[in-house]
Image: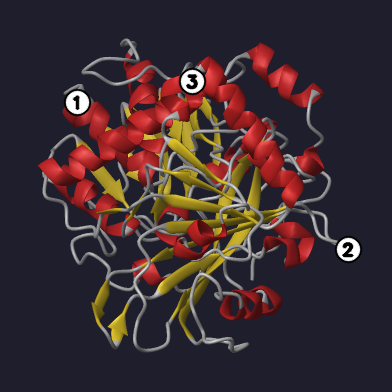
Amino acid sequence: MASDTDPRTNQAGLPSANPTSSYWLREPNTLLLGRRSTPDLPEEADIVIIGSGITGVFAARSLLQDYSCNKKVVMLEAREACGGATGRNGGHCQPLVYGTNPAVAAFELETFSFLERLVRDEKIDCDWITLSGGVHAFMSTPLFQTAVAQIDSLTKSHPFLASQLEVILPTNPSKLVRLRAPNCHGAIIQKTAASLWPYKLIAHILTSLLPNPNFNLQTNTPVLSLSPSPSSPGKHQILTPRGTLTTPKVLLATNGYTSHLLPSFSDLIVPVRGQISAIVPPSPVQTLTHSYLFAADPEKGQHAPRDDYLVQRPVLNPDSGGEMIYGGGRRLALRLGLGQYNDDELELKVAHYLRSNLSPPLDLGGKDEELPATYEWTGVMGYSRDSNAWVGEVPSHRGIWVCAGYTGHGMPSAALSARAVAAQMLGLPESGQGHARLPEEFKITEERINRARQGAKLEDCGGWEGAYFSGPADGE
């Protein structure tokens, strides 16, 4: 079992060699299993991408397809393809429209539209379902009032964003009952939300890149260290158990593991372990038309808000399918999951909680019932000290780019963030072809680094202690 971060440095280590079994990885793509485009690790490359999740794969797609660059691109993955956070998340794609900077909200809406079009146009078999919306059910009045105040302000300043939201007051109990959230203190419906099989989306993109002679995928190749090349000035040396690779440009698409290779980011992107269960609903299977987020202020004796999230898999027939992918319970976890980069174990308290708290929105007939789970797994998210992703070249490490730190909210922002960082690496404009520009809040600058270090405390990284609206989790 891997250890958690070094408490003195908060530096993550390598991904666990034997992680828990994720529901999404149970049907691996045979073309990707153990895939190595060449038997031996190349000695040189023009660009090296470390990580094969949504960020790394969309960066490679942008480099080789969108921008048609004629450069040798090598992708290194410590485990099997998409074996990290993207293959272990909650199966949601839902932009956060309120409680965040409006530019970030608009960027997430654009990313959602981009993904929705891509799935439709390329007929990607990834169970993409556009839902009736995402229900944010507030289990405490103060937090709901905070959210409503933010939406009132958004209505005045950015009416288009506010139009994407519907506030359901506790004085409308019949509507809360219809939303399957009768006990909450108020709810907000985000009208843009989808569920999907994230691994299958990434596997489709990745397999489409395999025939490109400029693309080289090397799975089961962990990166041990990243350092300046002693023999090639201006280049970087990447050490792996299978040899050394030299390149002038590196992209760390490593999210919660970023500090393993970039220790200077140990206090900017912190690993946080989340836990998820695939729960079998009772028969007959009830069909949910929304995804759910359950939010509450810190409870007595706890130090983190409730931020549980739920999405349903497709119902096959009245007696099968419809598994509830339910994640969260982090306030019950060891150290709230903060600083944990090992995804090779389950926390029993959290597992029991997830199996026992699905009523509502499920109608269990008033029973206090613990439901069975077919899969229970953990995954490592990268929580940002200032709650925004970090995208760009590292000022003190020329030739090293980062695209990570999504604070559990990568599905509606990573794809176009990756496209932007790919443009940066090629010296091209970040926008184009109708895509929104990267938010200024995401860009890496010395000023932002200093401001982040002078702002939130490290132990509050990711929105602990009531700063919940920095972004609810996707369960990445």
Tag 1's secondary structure? helix
| Whole-number angstrom distance, CA of label 3 to CA of label 1 | 24 Å
Q: Residue at x 82, y 35 (%)?
A: 457
Task: Give the residue displayed 66% in from the left and 65% down from the top.
Answer: 329
Nearest to the observer: residue 348 or residue 353: 353
Colour treatment of the image: secondary structure
Q: Closer to the camera, 443 or 63?
A: 443
Give the number of the disc on residue 103: 3
Instruction: Give the residue at the far right of this rendering.
Output: 301
Name which residue lies at 19% across and 26% down: 66
- Mark 2 Cα shell of 10 Å, populated few (<14), some (14-19), many (≥20): few
Dot placed on the residue nearer the N-terminal end, 2 or 3: 3
Which numbered disc, 3 or 1, marks the residue closer to the eye?
Answer: 3
Q: Position of residue 257 (x, y in %)?
A: 57, 47
Horizontal and vertical percent position of residue 16: 55, 63
At x 56%, y 76%, the residue is: 359
Say if 443 sits above or below 166 in the image. above
Q: Amino acid at mark 1?
A: Asp
Q: Amino acid at mark 3?
A: Ala
From the viewer's side, name the closer residue of 315 and 44.
315
Left or right, 151 with reference to 292 = right
To which residue does mark 2 refer?
301
Residue at numbered disc 1: 66
Q: Nearer the viewer, mark 2 or mark 1?
A: 2
* Residue 112 can be seen in this image: yes
- Crowd around label 3: few <14 · some 14–19 · many ≥20 (10 Å): some
Chain-order first, disc 2 or disc 1: 1
Left or right of 14: which side holds 21? left
Spatial CA distance of label 2 from label 3 is 36 Å
In the depicted structure, whether residue 94 falls above or below residue 351: above
Give amino acid for label 2.
Gly
